Amino acid sequence: MCKVPVVVIRSNDFCFLGILRSCGDEGIPVIPIVFSWDGAGEWFSEKSKYYINPVKVHNPAEDEKKSKEDILELGKALKKKYGTKILIIPSSDTSLIFLQKYIDEFKKYFYLMGHGDFDKDCLNELSKSEFARIMHRSGVPIPETYDVKSKDDLVSVGNKVSYPCVCKPIMKDIGNTFQRTHNQNKAIECRSSEDLTNRLNEELEKGYQFIVQEKIFMEGLEDEISIYAYADAAGKVTMLSGVYKIEEYPKPYGTAVVCKQYVKTELVPLAKKTMAALKWHGFVNIEFMRNSRNNQWVVIEVNLRPWLTNYLQSFLGFNYVASLYREIYLKESKGSDALISVNNEFLLFDTAKYIQMEIERNENIKEAVEKVEKVIQSNVGKCLFLYYLLDDELPGLAEKEIMIEKYGNRQLFEHLYDVMDLNNKELKENKKIFNLARRLNV
């Protein structure tokens, strides 16, 4: 494989680390673009063996102009050195929006995944309002959705939307302002027309615009499934995989604490239809929910960049970033050995959040850690931890030290990591068996 590097923007620590590891497994060199901000916390990814020669830039949320100039300067130098444009990958919606906002300048030096030959922006697809229209025109089922861009819209929508409803900003900004100023909530839930009017009047005055959607009721976590898909330049879907959450935090609608590799067969045609509607070239994450009111699966949203479970997919043979790289630089459009991932017992496991969740349940650190240990022991050889990886263990060990500093009791955590270490050794052997079985279609 040629040694043209990939540029990766660090704005989400674990997603960024997953991209580093996905590239590292394939021998693809990475140039990390990094910046930070007050309250960003510990960057465990910096401990990875794949984190080499980072390029520091201004934070786009604090100085868009200087950040853009920093990245353009890097792109110009890399294009001159390698004689080609460089694939650039964002690790969050905010860095994706930043790249797309200035695509006419960035595309001179970088490939930005999206449409056709990567020359067209995907701002329409990033707008929740325009995305809903694209899906509706293509016959892809989505929740009942309305725009609220003014107080006049609010009156009309308030009389026809189903309650309870969920209100989301039409477009995120580079600084993720709405979420930061709303206690990390991505949406507002309203239970009546009066509630909707009162809540959104204030938000409209702040300059926000919203989509208002019916709330989808689920009977369990298995009714929310993420499907990952890759389409080549001809629009052919060459890979499909996915996950569903087994544990989440906070409840409800939290981030996965434990999730499982899984694809529901009946969603595959709908995933392909969604890709065709987007006219997408590259990979996406399609979020599905089953509405218990009518038993219908609907598309909630599509993420147009790598997701938190990107390395779980790579680990099991569905390396989306490497596939994009090979298509661009080696002109290969082949995906995984198997088009659709085999459902299996492998889990992605967030140790720190699981412990935090258990502490909040019973306020006892010892019982919380022992509960997490028991779950790992019952799945030994099947857990892929967010940070603690056998062949790249330093990010996980850094996370362990932070937990010891936070909760105390080093001996308790040393024992936990002994159990995790045993899992990692068996995981490596189980991966070999799984990949052999997958290639043989067993």
Image: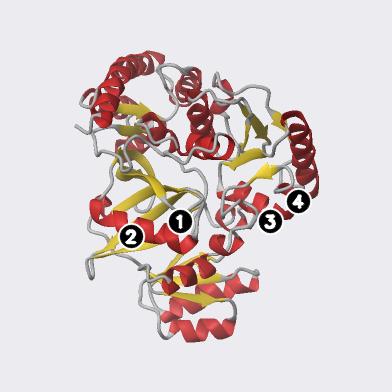
* Residue 289 locus on image (x, y percent): 32, 59
Residue at position x 43%, y 39% from top?
Answer: 334
* Mark 4 burial class by Cα count in 10 Å: few <14, some 14-19, many 20+: some
Residue at position x 62%, y 39% from top?
Answer: 87
Q: Quadrant of residue 91?
A: top right
Q: Are marks 1 and 2 in contact (CB under 8 Å)?
A: no
Q: Secondary structure at mark 1?
A: strand
Q: Amino acid at mark 3?
A: Lys
Of 304 and 182, nearer the camera is: 304
- Real-space Cα distance between discs 3 and 4? 9 Å
Front: mark 3 or 2 = 2
Q: Are marks 3 and 2 in contact (CB under 8 Å)?
A: no
* Residue that carries the numbered disc 1 in the rendered image: 302
- Colour theme: secondary structure
* Residue that carries the numbered disc 4 in the rendered image: 105
* Residue that carries the numbered disc 2 in the rendered image: 270
Q: Is residue 430 left or right of residue 22?
A: left
Residue 34 visible in the snapshot? yes
* Residue 385 locus on image (x, y percent): 38, 28
Q: Secondary structure at mark 2?
A: helix
* Disc nearer the start of the sequence (1/2): 2
Front: mark 1 or 2 = 2
* Residue that carries the numbered disc 3 in the rendered image: 101
Looking at the figure, which quarter contains the N terminus? Answer: top right
- Real-space Cα distance between discs 2 and 4? 35 Å
Q: Amino acid at mark 1?
A: Val
Q: Quadrant of residue 53?
A: top right
Q: Is residue 346 left or right of residue 388?
A: left
Looking at the picture, does residue 96 appear above or below residue 415? Answer: below
